[in-house]
Image (cartoon, grey):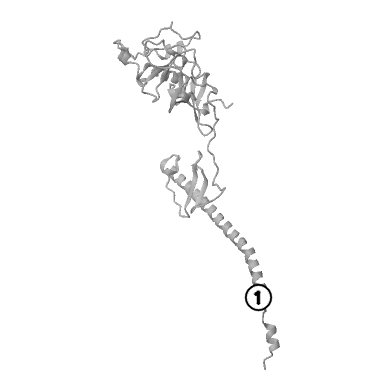
């Protein structure tokens, strides 16, 4: 005979079942974030290991490149990288000067590996110059006319004063057909030359001889001066028009249009009223013009009083004083 009273005691009531479900739901709410966080951390760790493996693969490729070519690579495109893990793409993939690798801004299979880098950024940092800063190289004073900042290893300099009469005569020996020592633009001894290439202008037809800087006697003087006075410079030339016009352009409205006005440069040291001097055209080698008084640009002409020579050089910052 079944004891109904005992059977009823073994069953769960509805309230008890609901209580169990509530407890399970609470446990699930607590456990799910913890589990998801564990999964997220595991994925991040795996992505970091992928970045590390990719970085080590690049370094192995660098070593192989060195063995094959006898020199260090300068860009990752030169390397054959053997890497078989998850796809890694980095915003910064930099080969340092010591051939180590720096990776930053990486994604693994499209997932960002936030604030994680491989290696160290060992790119050299150089002194950053401002336009107009005065520097001295080889006991000659210059003004800075171009510098891209701490990541740029070179700086473009304009000689503070033109070549002297003695320098023009020394470096132009055999190449200057006309130099009038009486027509000097000021009393400080600055020289000047009028451009007469000896190979084409002896006939007296001077009009055809004043438009090509590459074959000019002025270029010969600048090159000879560089060899003697600026041997560390990678380049020596005349200043360009757009370098003279640093921050000197202004756009003004004219009714329904706008016009570009070329004004006297902001920096007085670029244009010096004490002398007229040679400059290149915008293209660099196509021609020679003259900076006249009041900031005017004129075609080079033998009728002008002898313009002075004011070289520009491109110099590695390592040869400049550190302070």
**Quadrant of the image occupied by residue 279:** top left
- Would you place residue 304 above or below residue 101 in this image? above
Dot 1 crowding, Cα within 10 Å, few <14, some 14–19, many 20+: few
**Quick check: 321 above or below 109?**
above
Q: Residue at x 49, y 45 (%)?
A: 91
| Quadrant occupied by the N terminus | bottom right
Q: Nearer the viewer, residue 61 or 55?
A: 55
Residue 251 % position (x, y): 46, 26
Q: Determine whether, in the image, residue 17 is placed left or right of residue 277.
A: right
Q: How far from the left and from the top, in percent, is residue 299?
A: 38, 17
Residue lying furthest left: 203
Residue 193 against residue 41 in the figure, above or below: above
How many tags in the picture?
1
Of 51 and 113, nearer the camera is 113
Q: Residue furthest front?
A: 255
- Check the image and name the residue furthest to the bottom: 1
Task: Assign the C terminus to one quadrant of the image.
Answer: top right
The location of residue 297, given as percent across then percent down, is 42, 18
One can see residue 199 in this view: no
Residue 222 placed where, x, y %? Answer: 42, 19
Can residue 27 be seen from the camera position used here? yes
Task: Quickly name the residue at label 1.
Answer: 17
Q: Tell me which corner region of the image, top left, top right, bottom left or bottom right, holds residue 119.
A: top right
- Helix, strand, or loop for circle 1? helix
């Amino acid at each position: 005979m079944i004891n109904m009273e005992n059977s009823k005691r073994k069953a769960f009531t509805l309230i008890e079942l609901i209580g169990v479900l509530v407890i399970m739901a609470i446990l699930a709410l607590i456990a799910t974030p913890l589990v998801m966080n564990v999964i997220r951390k595991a994925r991040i760790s795996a992505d970091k290991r992928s970045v590390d493996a990719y970085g080590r693969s690049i370094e192995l490729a660098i070593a192989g490149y060195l063995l094959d070519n006898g020199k260090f690579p300068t860009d990752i495109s030169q390397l054959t990288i053997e890497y078989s893990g998850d796809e890694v793409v980095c915003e910064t993939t930099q080969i340092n000067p010591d051939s180590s690798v720096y990776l930053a801004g990486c994604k693994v299979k499209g997932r960002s590996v936030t604030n994680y880098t491989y290696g160290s950024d060992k790119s050299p940092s150089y002194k950053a110059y401002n336009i107009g800063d005065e520097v001295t190289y080889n006991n000659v004073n210059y003004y800075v006319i171009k510098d891209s900042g701490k990541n740029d290893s070179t700086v473009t300099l304009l000689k503070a004063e033109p070549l002297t009469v003695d320098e023009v005569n020394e470096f132009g020996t055999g190449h200057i057909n006309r130099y009038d020592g009486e027509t000097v633009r000021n009393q400080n001894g600055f020289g000047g030359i009028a451009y007469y290439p000896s190979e084409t202008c002896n006939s007296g037809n001077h009009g055809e001889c004043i438009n090509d800087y590459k074959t000019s006697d002025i270029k010969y003087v600048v090159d000879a001066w560089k060899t003697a006075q600026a041997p560390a410079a990678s380049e020596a030339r005349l200043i360009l028009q757009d370098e003279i016009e640093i921050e000197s352009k202004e756009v003004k409205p004219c009714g329904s249009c706008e016009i570009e006005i070329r004004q006297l440069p902001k920096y007085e040291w670029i244009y010096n009223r004490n002398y007229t001097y040679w400059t290149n055209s915008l293209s660099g080698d196509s021609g020679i013009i003259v900076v006249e008084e009041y900031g005017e640009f004129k075609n080079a002409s033998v009728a002008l009083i002898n313009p002075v020579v004011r070289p520009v050089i491109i110099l590695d910052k390592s040869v400049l004083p550190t302070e």
